[in-house]
Amino acid sequence: MLRTVGARLSFTTVARTKVAMAVAAARNPGYDSFDESLSIAAGGEPVPWRELTDGHGGRFHVFELEEPSDVEVEYRATVGGRAEPEPVDEMTLIRYVRPSRYAESDRLLPTSYGQFGSLAGAELVAAVRAWVHEQLAYVAGSSRGTDGAVETLLHRRGVCRDYAHLAIALLRGKDVPARLTAVYAPGLEPMDFHAVAEAFVDGAWHIVDPTGLAPRTGMLRITSGRDSSDTAFLSTVGGSLVLRRLSVSAEADAELPDEDPSLSVMLS
């Protein structure tokens, strides 16, 4: 499968702002082809950037602006084939079973045990996915950037990141390693960056997408982490910015099947 993805961002910064972006597809071994381009301009002039590697093949592009600036970013990539499954060590699995800022598994542990009883492994993952899908309503703009899994469950609504955070917290509550992954998702409507969960069962990471809004078989990893605090597509490290425009594109050269939640799918 050949996937063509891209993102265009426009934002305005204040003076002395350092920006970290996660918009590039993860560069893991195994792809048949991987062609990409990234341009960043401030006031029409090119901006030098640095690429920092994160875990799971993720990459952050970092740059600093001394003066208030209007910034334009354009990223494009065409990726062929699928990446190899990543090696997993014990420390990684420990990290992803702990509570985190937006996936408060310690606070939701009683809910997880009360709702899912003695379920384990793939059966538990399927049950969590179905329960979160049934309990929440997808409402654009309904959640705040500071909301975690507990707030999402109380409000019973949210967007993709909220669905993923709740699923992750419930899985970790039953000692299943789970993480949040930002993806390009061909077939997603409306198109945007998409957030899903991944659960480690049967010796591998499997995609859990309680929203069911896009076929998992076409998804392309951007970055993965404990929760959205590790995977935000745009953040500042000093200074501040205001996002003016965002457009995302993701297409596949093969017909994508309808999403079937019963299938086990691993992310490329």
Image (tube, rainbow, N blue to C red):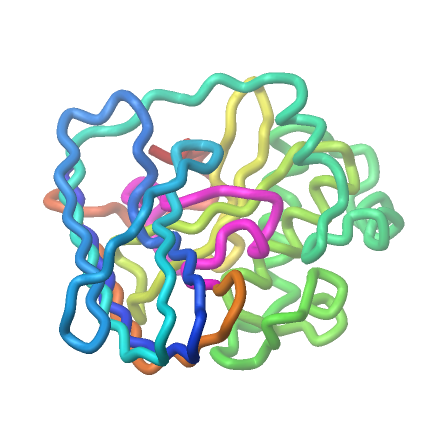
Q: Relative to the observer, which residue lies in front, 226 or 259?
A: 226
Q: How many marks?
A: 0
Q: Relative to the observer, which residue lies in front, 213 or 179?
A: 179
In the rendered image, the quadrant that contains the N terminus is top left
Tell me what residue is drawn at x 35 percent, y 50 percent: 61
Tell me what residue is drawn at x 60 percent, y 51 percent: 227
Question: In the shown orientation, is residue 207 left or right of residue 144?
Answer: left
Above or below, 226 against 210 in this view is above
Question: In the shown orientation, is residue 202 left or right of residue 186?
Answer: right
Residue 251 visible in the displayed image: no
Locate residue 161, reporting x and y percent: 54, 61
Tell me what residue is drawn at x 31 percent, y 78 percent: 69
Which stretch is magenta? Answer: 213-235
Above or below, 200 against 214 in this view is above
Locate residue 215, reporting x and y percent: 33, 49
Give residue 122's quadrant in the image.
top right
Question: In the shown orientation, is residue 65 left or right of residue 248?
Answer: right
Residue 177 visible in the displayed image: yes
Q: Is residue 210 magenta?
A: no
Locate residue 49, reporting x and y percent: 29, 52
Above or below, 187 against 138 in this view is above
In the rendered image, the quadrant that contains the C terminus is top left
Q: Relative to the observer, which residue lies in front, 119 or 162?
A: 162
Locate residue 213, reporting x and y percent: 39, 60
Tell me what residue is drawn at x 26 percent, y 29 percent: 82
Question: In the shown orientation, is residue 39 left or right of residue 154?
Answer: left
